[in-house]
Amino acid sequence: MVWSMAVPPLGAQPSIGLDGGVTDPSAAAALIRDFANTIDVEERTDVFADADGAADWLRGHGLLDDTTLPGAADGNEPAFGEDDRLMAVTLRAGFRERLLITGGGDGDVQKITQAQRLLDELPLSVALGAEAEPLRPVTGTAARIALARVAAAWAHVCATGEWRRLKRCPDHTCGWVFWDATRSRTRRWCTMRVCGNRAKTRAYSERRRAG
């Protein structure tokens, strides 16, 4: 089963607020949000800037199991190499562009296409066993299995419709991925007070210059 720009275990489902809004994302949606936010445009930091940082993040989220890596036991190969890091960066870039489109922005189609090619190489199987991951990686190195688990999270949010609430802030100086908990799913900015006001100020200045 291959998913289109399209989990760890599915985990908690989204919480519904009294006003009909969804107050909290599911575990799968939170994973996609956090994976996309491993780069911080405003702070100029990138957790995936090197292979060790990417491996630590995936390991910390229960996605990377070092014991299954080829060469891990004898030390001939790194636990998570540069090629693996580049795959993680490619997948993250695709998610970020797709979530920018979800929020009404203009995403980079080329980056989405590159991420889609990677997803096509991360097949998943559907399991019925009570103790198994409902969507689990078919095969591959531990690095690919870790990324396939991220792909499974995307499949979950697509199936539940939660992808519509995952958005990337369109302010190019921010780019933060956030969860839209509003009932109408019309939130555009990560924060109206900061990024929304920046956009209003820029639009006002442009109108003044034009007229």
Image (cartoon, grey):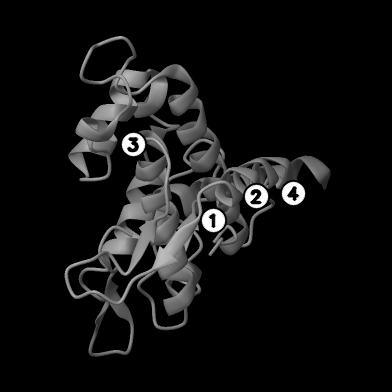
Whole-angstrom CA distance, mark 2 to mark 4, is 5 Å
Residue situated furthest top in the rendering:
76
Which one is in front in this view, the residue at disc 4 or the one at disc 1?
A: 1
Q: Which residue is mark 4?
A: 207
Tell me what residue is drawn at x 26 percent, y 34 percent: 68
Residue 130 percent across, percent down from the top left:
19, 75
Q: Which disc number belongs to residue 160?
A: none
Instruction: Characterize the local packing of mark 3: few (<14), some (14-19) or many (20 or more) Cα atoms within 10 angstroms.
Output: many
Contact, mark 3 vs mark 2 (Cβ under 8 Å): no
Tell me what residue is drawn at x 25 percent, y 21 percent: 72
Check disc 1 and give the amino acid type: Leu
Q: Which residue is mark 1?
A: 99
Residue 143 percent across, percent down from the top left:
37, 34
Which one is in front in this view, the residue at disc 3 or the one at disc 2?
A: 3
- Of residues 118 and 27, the one drawn nearer to the viewer in this rendering: 118
Residue 123 percent across, percent down from the top left:
51, 55
Contact, mark 2 vs mark 4 (Cβ under 8 Å): yes
| Mark 1 or mark 3: whose residue is earlier in sequence | 1
Which one is in front in this view, the residue at disc 1 or the one at disc 3?
A: 3
Tell me what residue is drawn at x 60 percent, y 61 percent: 4
- Of residues 49 and 154, the one drawn nearer to the viewer in this rendering: 154
Check disc 4 and give the amino acid type: Arg
| Mark 3 or mark 2: whose residue is earlier in sequence | 3
Check disc 3 and give the amino acid type: Ala
- Of residues 187 and 96, the one drawn nearer to the viewer in this rendering: 96
Contact, mark 1 vs mark 3 (Cβ under 8 Å): no
Q: Is residue 82 above or below residue 172?
A: above
As helix, strand or loop, the secondary structure at mark 3 comes to helix
Q: Which residue is mark 3?
A: 142
Q: Is residue 67 above or below residue 147?
A: above
Side of 201 where 205 appears, left or right: right
Q: Which residue is mark 2?
A: 204
